[in-house]
Image (tube, helix red, strand yellow):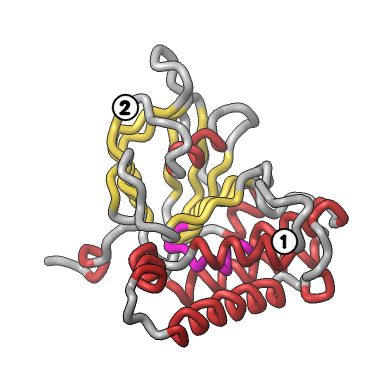
Amino acid sequence: MRTDDDLIEPLLVLKDVAIGYDSSASLVNIPNLEILPGEIVAIAGPSGIGKSTLLRTIAGLVSPISGQLEVCGATLPEAPPRGHLGYIPQKLGLVRHASVRHNVELGARAGMDRRDAITLLTNPYVNIGDILDSRKQRKQRSTEAIDIMGLSEKSTEPIRRLSGGQQRRVATARTLAQRPKLILADEFLSELDEETLNSVLQAVTNYVRESKAALIVVEHDISRAKMMADKLLVIDDGRINPFVKGTKAMEVNV
């Protein structure tokens, strides 16, 4: 008998995937992995074992050595629909001379559907009010994300004047303004004090649950990973071992 989960399309599917930079020596081998809407998945493991490379492969920045990846309905190397994939790398990629608001609005702009954008720009019969409404919506998304990240008083500040923790919050706000279906976050909670960390994590969790998005986060703190995630994936000796819902601490001998 089919269950409700059988009817839900996963946002990420990996089948017999090997990742790495050298075809003769893969970093991680993943026999099978599916991530559904609304799920938060934490990836843990020793430094240098391939956690960040796994995220970069899902993001389409590194080609897999072998296997099949489906991201938001697209099979790589086909890109997922514009705006559906959000990525917070360790190196945040912020425009350092630009303001907080400008950086966050870049995310909101990326979240616009390509077809809607083309229609607004090329349709000779489009109402100018539609274009203005679109810009207004981007600004609203950006303002909401900035407020949620507690950066309202810094919105006009250039990135270069912010602390490392504040810059991480800007990168998170940029992704929330994008409204992606799948978020990849590489240790996005580092450099945050405990109070701010809890606030940022709660905001991202709320977005994932309410929007039926999914979050895959690399987290070096194993206790924090267990706390935040529905599933914990531990990379060990080049294989990835899924710990089921509840994220119980399980030793898996590989």
Taking the image as shown, residue 127 lies to the left or right of residue 250, namely left
Residue at 35% x, 47% y is 79
Question: Is 34 located above or below residue 173 in the figure?
Answer: above
Residue at 66% x, 43% y is 90
Seen from this angle, which residue lies furthest left? 1
Identity, as a three-letter code, of the amino acid under mark 1: Arg
| Quadrant assignment for the N terminus | bottom left
Cα separation between marks 1 and 2: 35 Å
Compare residues 121 and 215 and report the one nearer the observer: 121
Residue 167: x and y in percent read: 76, 55
**Classed neighbour count for the residue bearing mark 1: other residues with Cα under 10 Å, few (<14), some (14–19), many (≥20):** many
Compare residues 47 and 65 and report the one nearer the observer: 65
Query: So how many labels did they put on this image?
Result: 2
The answer to whether residue 55 is visible is yes
Helix, strand or loop status at disc 1: helix
Question: Is 91 located above or below residue 183 in the figure?
Answer: above
| Mark carried by residue 66 | 2
| Mark carried by residue 169 | 1
Helix, strand or loop status at disc 2: strand
| Quadrant assignment for the C terminus | top left
Q: Quadrant of residue 118?
A: bottom left
Question: Is 30 located above or below residue 194 in the figure?
Answer: above
Stretch of the chain drawn in magenta: 174-182
Identity, as a three-letter code, of the amino acid under mark 2: Ser
Residue at 43% x, 21% y is 26
**Classed neighbour count for the residue bearing mark 2: other residues with Cα under 10 Å, few (<14), some (14–19), many (≥20):** some
Residue at 80% x, 67% y is 195
